Image (spheres, grey):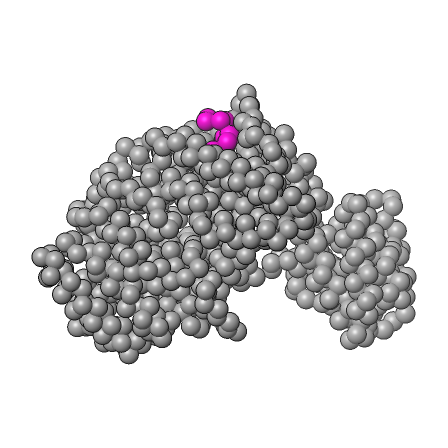
Amino acid sequence: MLTQLREIVDKVVSAHTLIDALDQLVSNTTLVMKTDCCSVYIADHQRQVYTLMATQGLNKSRRRISLRFDQGLVGLVGQRAEPLNVADARLHPSFKHLPGIGEESFRSFFGTPIIHQRQVLGVIVVQQREQREFTESEESFLVTLAAQLAGILAHAKAQGMWFEKGNRLHLTGSAASSGVAVAKAWWDDTQPLLEHVAPASCLDIHAEQERLTIAIDSAGKEFRRLRKRFDSDLQKETLAIFDLFSHLLNDPLLRQDLKLRIDGGDQAEWAVRQVVEAYSNRFANMKDQYLKERARDIRELGQRLLYFLCDDAPNELQWDEPIVLLTRELTAAMLATVPVGKLAAVVAQDGAANSHAAILSRALGIPAIMGVDFTPHTVHNNVVVVDGYRGDLLVNPNRHVLAEYRRLLREDDELEKIVECDQQQHAVTKDQQRIMVHINAGLSADSHFAVNKGIDGVGLYRTEVPFLLQRSFPSEEEQINQYRTILQTYPQQPVVMRTLDIGGDKPLPYLSIEEDNPFLGWRGIRFTLDHPEIFMIQVRAMLRASIGLKNMDILLPMISGINELDDAKAIIERAYTDVAQIALVAGQQLHKPRIGIMIEVPSMLYQLHALVGRVDFISVGSNDLTQYLLAVDRNNARVASVYDALHPAVLHALKHIVDSAEKYQLPVCVCGELAGDPVGALLLVGMGYRSLSMNARNVAKIKYILRHINGSDMKLLANKVLQVDVADDVRQLTTAFIEQHQLGGFIRAGNK
């Protein structure tokens, strides 16, 4: 029956409307299963009813047939969210007779729910006149069919093609940049797509090379122009997005690969697609979300090259009023192309919150939502509301909703002005407890790092980016230049440099690694200890870069046992001895760095006592710690809902770490996403953490929040939270706490 199942699904998918799709479903299911009747009931969660939307065998022509969620066998199937097989439906206590539809002639009943992401979208039912139970094979067929339909119906619901009374289009995605916007939507379809480029050869290789050279030069000029446009508005680290594009364009390896493709007879567009996809795939296969998103940046570069290969000069469209930009995938160039003051928000079908375009949106204060499943013609040129806090896109909302969001928009603007005025102040709670606020750095391979005023240093500097952008291990001298730049940028503040966090989940392009489960495999310190020559070169480069300075600390990732720590320290000690001699000969001084480890592998929770005398500080990687504790890959969409940094087990682990750190007198910092989240920061400070490291975009708001609450109140909140057993209860408690302190505007739209 597998072939017949596929045929039914194909017919449903190819139908022009959802009603046609459901009609195809019931008619074909009746034929395949040789039943007398097949019906589909669709759930209306607003009205709490199931409505008969399609049937083969019942009479629904006279009126709209509906059952409450608690009525009949259909309601029972929905309530239990499980199949129901009854030989004689009329004898079942939950049976409800619906006059006028001819149901009384059917005896046997089998119904199964259509479920998507734990929500019942509807119920599919087959019935026969004879009294009998349906067989296991029939049950299996219908259950499988319902599972296939779930995704189709969920997609239709996301597109607004649903049947709920008074339904207005309400789409959701990933909140990439907070804020609220109300404006007309504009669909941008001008950007060429790499996947649309087909294999093609050229007749004149020299002319094709010339076309590519002109396109590269044009793209380079554009990136320089865009950087100059934002030069006075953005921090230099954010502007480094355009520096990275320029760096890649001038990369001799990239140019050489493109040239070789064209020399082999490929058309320039086809050469660009092949080379860019190869480079992009190196990053796309990584588990680390930050580095994974660099694949999108490389694809953006390729798509801009395609744009200029089309011989079209960049045009700036003009709008009378600000617009909400709709696009397949948001790029930094798109953001910069829209005239200043005319971009209210952006909504992208693809993309994620860590892409460079999303980072730029946050830096510009533009609300953004990524991964929204919309049909362009249903949204384009309509009035929309973008809620960047919740990830909601409302199309043609009623006047009451519009009025409310316009009020919230005014309040958001007021709050932003207040926060910006105070961003240079230190983070000191109302009862005078000092909290150190650091930034996580490492945006690009060779960017200029801004002196972020008001921060207390760099809590995490990722050193792996230059390793991943090249075709071979960077030399010691290349690494020295990279590290020296950031150390000199913050000469009076600590800079915590994490050693290479590469391996199974971040494969180097020049070192192939294949594993069944790379996230639990050869990565982090495991990789570098197996390659002491690489580790030695990196540590020497760090130490040589720090000669004459006293602000560098070294952080070791993915430590799961004391033996790994001891082995790593032995290599660091050897490197220090070598470099100290170099400094001595040159008449300079080498300051011995503090050594710390990442607490991200759960095994270290039970060996914190063994760190005494071995390390100088510890840093909590809350992202990896959460997914290892909960056995959840946070990049897997199927289990994304299970990944929860506010899970009670995670919170208790964090409390155990800070209590142990205090007991053993080990300085401790949290450098995961939780530190930059308003709820997370409050709980961490309440638990006893006094050092937080976060993305630069979160610094101002976290400092503002901490300055307006007593540390003692945060401690009481943390104690309450640690008494509950469900993450939702944690959210309720923390949300209520934030609202009580009149700071709700940091977790939702509006500041009142």
Outermost residue on the top side: it is 320
Is residue 168 on the magenta stretch?
no
Q: Which quarter of the picture shows residue 376? A: top right
Outermost residue on the left side: it is 587
Stretch in magenta: 336-347
Left or right: 389, with 487 as reference point: right
Residue at left offset 38%, top offset 62%: 473
Indicate the quadrant containing the C terminus: top left, top right, bottom left or bottom right. Answer: top left
Residue at left offset 87%, top offset 61%: 30
* Residue 482, image x, y percentages: 30, 52
Give 611 or 232, whichever is nearer the viewer.
232
Residue at left offset 50%, top offset 59%: 282
Is residue 346 on the magenta stretch?
yes
How many marks the image carries: the answer is: 0
Q: Which quarter of the picture shows residue 366? A: top left
Give 703 or 529, whichever is nearer the viewer.
529
Q: Is residue 748 above or below residue 665?
A: above
> Can residue 670 be seen?
no
Residue at left offset 31%, top offset 55%: 478
Left or right: 57, with 480 as reference point: right
Left or right: 708, with 28 as reference point: left
Left or right: 222, with 395 as reference point: left
> Can residue 149 be seen?
yes
* Residue 201, image x, y percentages: 67, 49
Q: Is residue 507 above or below residue 440?
A: below
Q: Which quarter of the picture shows residue 356? A: top left
Indicate the quadrant containing the N terminus: top left, top right, bottom left or bottom right. Answer: bottom right
* Residue 34, image x, y percentages: 89, 66
* Residue 304, image x, y percentages: 54, 40
